[in-house]
Amino acid sequence: MDIDLPVFIKPLEVEINGVGQYQHAGTVQDLTAMLLTNTPGQSRISRPCS
């Protein structure tokens, strides 16, 4: 089955490409895309959004 339904998560700010550079992740798909498109060791989930 190939259904593209968003799976919502508690919003996160993900630090990408260095200190202080954050991107928003509101779905599992957003988070997965960020983690799979960056070099290992450069991405980390640092804090939930308020």
Image: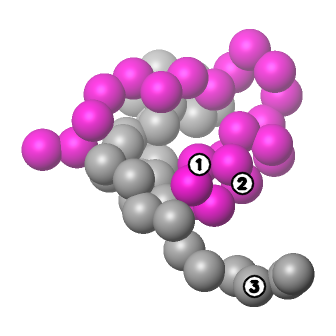
Residue type at mark 1: give it.
Answer: Leu
Mark 3 to mark 2: distance in Å?
A: 17 Å
Helix, strand or loop at mark 1: helix
Mark 1 to mark 2: distance in Å?
A: 5 Å
The correct choice, above or below, for 8 with respect to 32 in the image is below
Residue under label 2: 33
Helix, strand or loop at mark 2: helix
Q: Residue furthest top?
A: 41
Mark 1 to mark 3: distance in Å?
A: 18 Å
Q: Residues within 10 Å of mark 2 (few under 14, many from 20)?
A: few
- From the viewer's side, name the closer residue of 34 and 26: 26
Residues at circles 1 and 3 in contact by the CB criterion of under 8 Å? no
Q: Residues within 10 Å of mark 3 (few under 14, many from 20)?
A: few
Task: Give the foreground label among 1 and 3.
Answer: 3
Seen at 87% across and 81% down, the residue is 1
Residue under label 1: 31
Where residue 41 appears, as percent x and y from the top left, is: 74, 14
Seen at 22% across and 43% down, the residue is 49
Where residue 12 appears, as percent x and y from the top left, is: 36, 43
Helix, strand or loop at mark 3: loop
Residue under label 3: 3
The correct choice, above or below, for 23 with respect to 7 in the image is above
The correct choice, above or below, for 27 with respect to 19 in the image is below
The mark nearer the N terminus, 3 or 2, is: 3
Q: Residue furthest front?
A: 1
Residues at circles 1 and 2 in contact by the CB criterion of under 8 Å? yes
Residues at circles 3 and 2 in contact by the CB criterion of under 8 Å? no
Residue type at mark 3: give it.
Answer: Ile
Q: What is the span of residues highlighted in magenta in the rendered image?
A: 28-50
- From the viewer's side, name the closer residue of 34 and 2: 2
